[in-house]
Image (spheres, coloured by chain):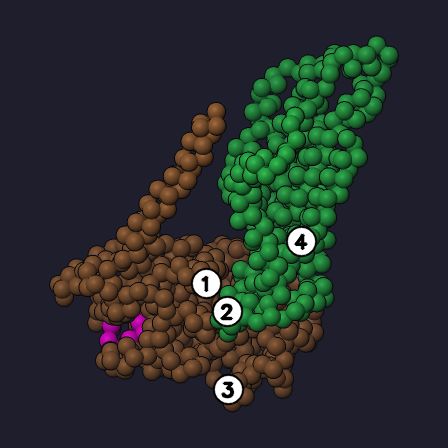
Amino acid sequence: MASTSKRYLRRPALTLAVTLVVMAVTAACTADSGGDGGGPVELTLLDHQEPRVELLKKLLPQFEQDMKEQGKEISVKLLEGPAEDTQFTTKLTLDYNSGNAPDVASFGNSGAVDFATSGFLLDLTPMTEEWTDWDDHFYEQLRKELVQPDGKIYVVPREAQIVQLFYRKDVLQSDGISTAQPQSWDDLLDRMTQVTRESGEPSLLFPAGEAWGGGTFFEGFIHLMLGTDSSLYDAEESKWIVASPGLTDVLTYYEALTEAGVMPVDPLLNPEPWVPTKYEAFPKGDLVATTCGTWCWIFDWGPEGAAPIDGLFKKVSTWEFPTKSGEDTFVWGSSGWVWAISADTENPEEAWELVKWLASGDFMAQNAVAVGAASPRDDLRNVKPYSDYDFLIDAERQLPKARSFVSLPGTDKIVQAVGEATEQVITGRMSGEEAAEFLAERATELLGEDNVKTL
Amino acid sequence: MRRVDGWRDTLTVMAFLAPALILIGLFLVWPALWALYQSFTNKALTGLTAMNPSFVGIDNYTRLLADGDFFASLLRTVAFVFFSAIVGQTLFAFLIAYLMANRPGWKLRAVPVFAVIFVLPLAVPETVAALTWASMVNGTESGFINRIIGVFGAGPIQWLQDYAMETVTIVNIWRGLSFAMVLFIAALEGVPRDVLEAAMVDGASAWQQLRWVTIPILRPQILTFLMLTTITTFGIFGLVYFLTRGGPGNATEIVGIYIYNQAFQFFEIGYGSAAGVLLLAILLGLGTYYVRLMRDQV
């Protein structure tokens, strides 16, 4: 009996030893990705949303072929992230934190500053300095926007977005309401109030509340804020301005929109607020005006979009954003999504080759068309299929004079505070002025007293 | 039974326990300790503090205790646990199980059919269950439930807007009913028939049999289920998140969603950990309370 138990005692030890050896051998085999030895290299690329992923699936073999012709054996493993932006950002953030980040990833430029500040991204400054396309063809406004607070460049634009007010021309015309460019906020509110009075439905959407996530800030709030004389950030003192006349004006305007019944409050509290608004009410013509970007022409209301509108270009048109004072209407123009390389990549040179390829010619032209974006380069207007899309090229022409907001460290906190404050207003829990005070308190709490100031 | 005596016995016992202890230590104790540690730092997933988190003492706890949203989510969770787990799951499941279980003078027909219907929720993965319900309670005219009430002339109702908490409570009752029912049926079948027959002979009514014979005998099983369902419902996340994401507004932001939002939407791991540690403390307290109740019974 004793010898039997000893034999059994020995077996686990033997099994453990064999397991450890196998694990060590496996680890040794998988650790070598070929980066240092000049052999084949496999890069990982993380993206999300079907049109983007499908395009990559279609075109990445071309990259591998192009590299092969240059004598480089680089293959790309495409990883698909969650479709929803917030969940994708969460996944990518966790990947970066856990050291499992893909070599190359694509995300909204608003996330770049936080990823760069966190040390997750590879400094691309030396590479862009040697890449002649960078200075020669990328719009200066976008290049400047991508310089991070430390003076370095960590991301390369994948596309450019022009955001403006999209409106239902057909509905306004049939109601006998002017389709001329509204100059001031009051002008816009008057017109939308008329529409709501006619239809009994909310008519104007500036995303607000917490459910829309970052969209509340980047698709709604900021386009009103840029129409005031106030700024959100004091670059000289490197401080966020969390209380200003402009901030109060914006939140008071949300209050006015809500009180007039033009804001679709209930849908904005929906977990997916873009569905009942942009995908349902706007195509039906109940919602008459909404903020949206170039992507809406294709991604949202195009024939293959989430909620197609028949005769889109006959029924829908665009206005620039009106301002508080009624002077200098404007559009928002900025790099939408960007490409970035992980700071932990074992193959920085190959990853840069991939990013350069993705930010050049054929791919960028097809990407712009697939997602409905303007080109961030000035040399794609004759490259098919982009050259066939006049409305995208028209949007691109607006880039040099467009306004934008450059994301800075702490933007995520401001975005959070704006989401909470606007929700207080649209739900009627606070007036605009009270919400402005709430925003100042919340932003100070989140950013720290040393990083904020009030006017 | 032989007592553990000497270092050889101790070693043998430890060897047998070691695999389980290692796993518990690795996947339960260590993360809890790690969360406790993080809760005293300003660790974030992005920004400067992602690279250089520092010790902030009890700042996160001070902030948490002054955070109205945290307490609101905690209160919502208590209500959610009470109505969906304690009243809904336990009471309804016991009632259904009582009707389905054989006992002297009572045998329900077509029990297997009912069993399949009631056990179905157990077989459906959480995400599928949430998506199915999201479709059923769709606020448009095409929503399944709205179609049904439409037959009676009622207009469509925005279930996840106007009755969000009530809806997720019902969904959670549906979800947990089957497990409770299976447990209670097994327990009810184990109640000695001769005891119930003796009660009948003594003239006890059906209610008196249930109140004075069956329930006292099943007290340990009922308490065990109450402990399990209270703790799991307190920490529930997926089902509610997939249905409402905590909305509309904060209407269904139960504490699990609050913690997720702090840690993984706003990337404040230190603060989220502090909320997680407080929740853990509450659950430990509840668990201890239930264990004491059970021990008192024994």
Give B232 or B245, whichever is nearer the viewer. B232
Query: Residue A135's spot in the image, x, y percent?
Result: 27, 82
Magenta span dominant secondary structure: loop
Query: Residue B162's spot in the image, x, y percent?
Result: 65, 50
Q: Sort mark 3 into few (<14), some (14-19) or many (20+) by Cα contacts within 10 Å.
A: few
Q: Chain of mark 2?
A: B
Mark number for residue B279?
4
Determine which quarter of the picture holds residue A37: bottom left
Element type where label 2 sits in the image: helix
Relative to residue A20, is residue A65 drawn left or right? left
Give A266 or A188, whichever is nearer the viewer. A266
Query: Residue A366's spot in the image, x, y percent?
Result: 27, 63
Q: Decide which of tag 4 and tag 2 comes sooner along the chain.
A: 2
Q: Chain of mark 4?
A: B
Chain B, which colour? green
Q: Are marks 1 and 3 on the same chain?
A: yes
Mark number for residue A97?
1
Chain A, which colour? brown
Q: Amino acid at mark 2?
A: Ala
Q: Amino acid at mark 4?
A: Leu
Circles 2 and 1, Cβ within 8 Å, touching? The answer is yes
Q: Amino acid at mark 3?
A: Ala
Q: Which residues are magenta?
A: A375-381
- Picture residue at 24% right of the left edge, 60% below the top: A34
Residue topped by disc 3:
A235
